Amino acid sequence: MVLRPGQTTVPLTPDSGPPPGYLALGVEHILGGADHLLFVAGLTLLVRPALRLAGALTAFTAAHSLTLALAALGLLALPQPPVEACIAVSLILLARALARDERPSAGAAWRLAGACGLLHGLGFAGALAEIGLPPGAAVPALLAFNAGVELGQLLAAVVVLALAALARAALAVLPARVRAPLRALPALALGAVAVAWTLGRVLAFWSPA
C-alpha cells in the first residue's frame, strides 16, 4: 500500500469474507449426516422429471436455509432431540411415497421438500451450534456453511442419479418377475432405517435418564 503525500496513517478495515473452513464444514456435514443424505437421495429417486426434481431441491434448499439462519442467529430455538426424531419421521414419509411409486406433482414435490427442509435446517443448526460462529463474522460464516451444504447436496444428487441410471440399465436385462422386488429395495431399506432411527430417537428423549 502506498501512502499519499501528508498521509501518516493507514485505515485498516476488517476482512468481510467468511472465516476459512466453514464452506468445507458445510460439505462435510451433509456428506457425513446420514439422515440428511438419505433424504436427498430419496427425493432424487422419487421426483421426476429433472426439472421437477430441480424445483423440489430448490424448495428444500430455501426451507432449510431459512430455519438454519433463524436458529443460528438465535431467532428460533427448539430442542434438538425432538427435531432429530421429526427428521427421521420425514424419511418414513419419503420411503412410503417411494414404496407406492407415487410421483408427486410439481406443487406436491415442492411442499414435501419445503416442509421437510424446515426440519432439516434445524438439524443443520444443531451441528453448527456445536462448531460455533466466530464473533464479528457470524453472517459470512453462516453463508459459507450453508453454501457448503448446498454443494454437498448437489454432489449427492448427481451421484444418486448416476447410480440410478446404472441400476435401471442392469435391471432392464432381468425378467420382469425379478425386476419388481429389486426396484422395491431402496424404499424398503430407507423405510427400515427411518423407522429404526425414529424409535431410537424418540426413546432417547422420552426414556428417563
Image (cartoon, grey):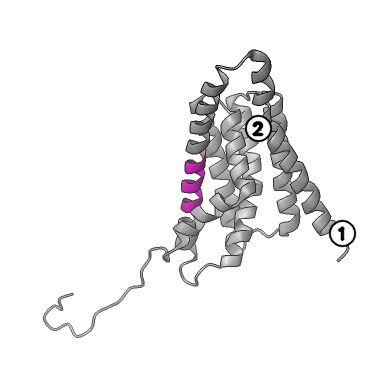
Say which element carries label 2: helix
Q: Residue 12, how many percent across, how many down?
A: 30, 76
Picture disc at residue 207: 1
In this rendering, the answer to whether 15 lies above or below 8 is above
In this rendering, the answer to whether 205 lies above or below 8 is above
Picture disc at residue 131: none
Magenta run includes residue 150: yes
Asked if labels 1 and 2 touch by Cβ distance under 8 angstroms, the answer is no
Q: Residue at x 13, y 84 (%)?
A: 6
Q: Could you say which quadrant of the image residue 178 lies in? A: top right
In this rendering, the answer to whether 14 lies above or below 148 is below
Q: Could you say which quadrant of the image residue 81 lies in? A: bottom right
Q: Residue at x 54, y 44 (%)?
A: 62
Q: Residue 112, how many percent across, how many down?
A: 65, 35
Q: Residue 10, how many percent across, how many down?
A: 24, 80
Q: Residue at x 77, y 42 (%)?
A: 195
The magenta segment is 147-156
Is the N terminus in the top left, top right, bottom left or bottom right quadrant?
Answer: bottom left
**In the shown orientation, is residue 111 left or right of residue 10?**
right
Q: Residue 35, how many percent across, how many down?
A: 64, 47
The residue that disc 2 covers is 186
Residue 91 appearing in the image: yes
Disc 2 residue type? Pro
Q: Dot 1, crowdedness within 10 Å: few (<14), some or many (≥20)?
A: few
